[in-house]
Amino acid sequence: METIEIPWYSVVDASEPISQGDILIGCPVFIPSPDYDFSDLGNLKSANFKLGIADIIIMTQACDLNLNNGGTPNVRNVVCAKIDDAKGESQSFLSSVRKNQTPAYHLLNKHIDTPVLSYQVVDFSELYTLPYSLLNAYREHQGKRLRLNSPYLELLSQRFGLFFSRIGIPDKYTIDSAELKADTKTT
């Protein structure tokens, strides 16, 4: 049986609205200062933010980003995950990410045509919530961008959901592996 190669990315023109799986390079992100005085929140008129620059992938579902009849999306804010170049990461780390053994990370393939993208590590533990209007304006500034294709987009979304839905329970609530092995051993 012949294997069908499915490209990881589509190249999207700057005029297309943003969607889930879009990669934005060098996007402005806002990092709030941790030094707030919370004693008088009712009178807070301004807050300090640090402006950062990050490479991101849009995680908000495409259906929420679709423009309605009024030309606005169903959400005002968009969840984005930071992506980092895989160069410089250890091979053991990249291997565990590739095998889905590290819940907080996901590996994206490289793209050798324009726009060029090296292997990227998506970090689900480093998220930004950015206004749709900011991302929509930035996409025009960036120009052509990559958009993750199906089924890779659904895999990314599933891994993101699994990262957030995982639970941790103390070992005392799990089945003892030695007892399980002894009780299920066949002779």
Image (cartoon, rainbow, N blue to C red):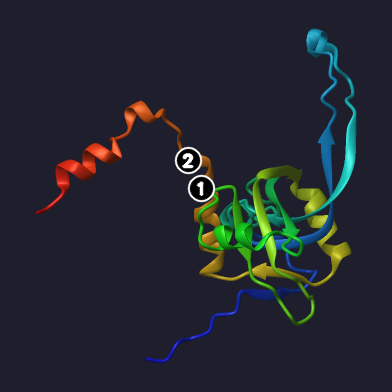
Please tell me whether residue 166 is drawn above or below residue 80 in the rendered image: above
Whether 13 is drawn above or below 95: the answer is below
Q: Position of residue 146 (x, y in %)?
A: 72, 70
| Nearer the observer, 56 or 176 | 176
- Look at label 1 and name its amino acid: Gly
Q: Residue 65 carries which label?
A: none
Res 89 visible: yes
Please tell me how many numbered marks the rendered image carries: 2
Is 107 positioned to the left or the right of 136 in the image? left
Q: How far apart are marks 2 and 1 (CA)?
A: 6 Å
Q: Who's the residue at 90% across and 42% down the image?
A: 51
Residue 44 drawn at (x, y percent): 85, 17
Instruction: Judge by depth and name the residue closer to the eye, 145 or 104.
Output: 104
Residue at the far bottom: name it.
Answer: 2
Quarter location, residue 168: top left
Q: Do the residues labelled 2 and 1 touch (CB within 8 Å)?
A: yes
Label 2: element kind? helix
- Mark 2 sits on what residue? 165
Residue depicted at x 58% and y 58%: 97
Q: Position of residue 18 (x, y in %)?
A: 71, 60
Q: Mark 1 points at which residue?
A: 161
Q: Residue furthest left?
A: 187
Report the quarter where the N terminus lies: bottom left
Q: x%, y% of residue 19? A: 66, 60
